[in-house]
C-alpha cells in the first residue's frame, strides 16, 4: 500500500482578485505529485478554515497581493487553532514587505515566498519540512 500523498490547499483570502501566481503554484505542486485543492479568489477567512478542515490538508498556501496580509493572516491562524488544525504547514506567498516576514512567522507562518521564488524551491521546502510539523 502506498504512502499518502501530501495534500495542499491554495487559497486567496480577501478581495484580491489576482490569482495567476496562486494558480501557477497549485499546478506546480500538483505536477510534483501532491494533491492540490484551489479555492479560488475572494474567499473569507471562515471559508478557508472550513476548507482546510473538510479537505484534511497537510499544507495551507495563502497568496496575498493586496496588502491585507497582516490583518487577514492572524485571523486565519486563529481559525486554524480553534478548529484543531494548528499542526498544518502554513505557507504564504505574494507581494509582501520584507519587514513583515518575521512578524508573519511569529504569527504561525512556516515560510514566506516572495516574487521570484522558483517553483521547485516551494516544492522542495514542502517535501523537506512536511514531517517536522
Image (cartoon, rainbow, N blue to C red):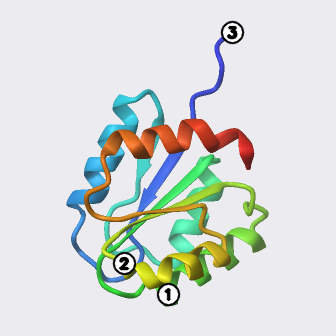
Of the two numbered discs 1 and 3 in the rendering, the one whose residue sits closer to the viewer: 1
Element type where label 3 sits in the image: loop
Sequence-first disc among 2 and 1: 1
Measuring from the top left, give residue 112's x and y in whole percent: 47, 64
The residue carrying mark 2 is: 96
Figure quadrant of residue 121 = top left
What is the distance, in whole Å, between disc 3 and disc 2 at their CAs? 42 Å
Q: Are marks 3 and 2 in contact (CB under 8 Å)?
A: no
Measuring from the top left, give residue 37's x and y in whole percent: 44, 47
Density class for disc 1 (Cα within 10 Å; few <14, some 14-19, many ≥20) is some
Element type where label 2 sits in the image: loop
Q: Could you tell whether 84 is left or right of 54 in the image?
A: right
The residue carrying mark 1 is: 70
Give the answer, above or below, for where 84 lies relative to 1: below
Measuring from the top left, give residue 92's x and y in whole percent: 46, 65
Sequence-first disc among 3 and 2: 3
Number of labelled discs? 3
Of the two numbered discs 2 and 1 in the rendering, the one whose residue sits closer to the viewer: 2
What is the distance, in whole Å, between disc 1 and disc 3 at their CAs? 42 Å
Density class for disc 2 (Cα within 10 Å; few <14, some 14-19, many ≥20) is many
Marking on residue 50 = none
Q: Residue at x 37, y 82 (%)?
A: 97
Frontmost residue, 54 versus 114 = 114
The residue carrying mark 3 is: 1
What is the distance, in whole Å, between disc 2 and disc 1 at their CAs? 10 Å
Q: Residue at x 26, y 49 (%)?
A: 24
Frontmost residue, 66 versus 122 = 122
Give the answer, above or below, for where 96 lies relative to 58: below
Measuring from the top left, give residue 31's x and y in whole percent: 34, 30
Density class for disc 3 (Cα within 10 Å; few <14, some 14-19, many ≥20) is few
For the N terminus, the quadrant is: top right
Amino acid at each position: 500500500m502506498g504512502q499518502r500523498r501530501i495534500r495542499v490547499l491554495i487559497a486567496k483570502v480577501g478581495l484580491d482578485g489576482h490569482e495567476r501566481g496562486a494558480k501557477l503554484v497549485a499546478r506546480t505542486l500538483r505536477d510534483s505529485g501532491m494533491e492540490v485543492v484551489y479555492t479560488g479568489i475572494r474567499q473569507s477567512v471562515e471559508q478557508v478554515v472550513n476548507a482546510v478542515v473538510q479537505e484534511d490538508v497537510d499544507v495551507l498556501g495563502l497568496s496575498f497581493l493586496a496588502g491585507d496580509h497582516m490583518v487577514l493572516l492572524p485571523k486565519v491562524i486563529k481559525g486554524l487553532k480553534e478548529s484543531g488544525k494548528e499542526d498544518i504547514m502554513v505557507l504564504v506567498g505574494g507581494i509582501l514587505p520584507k519587514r513583515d516576514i518575521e512578524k508573519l512567522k511569529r504569527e504561525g507562518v512556516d515560510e514566506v515566498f516572495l516574487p521570484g521564488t522558483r517553483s521547485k524551491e516551494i516544492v522542495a521546502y514542502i517535501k523537506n519540512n512536511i514531517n517536522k510539523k
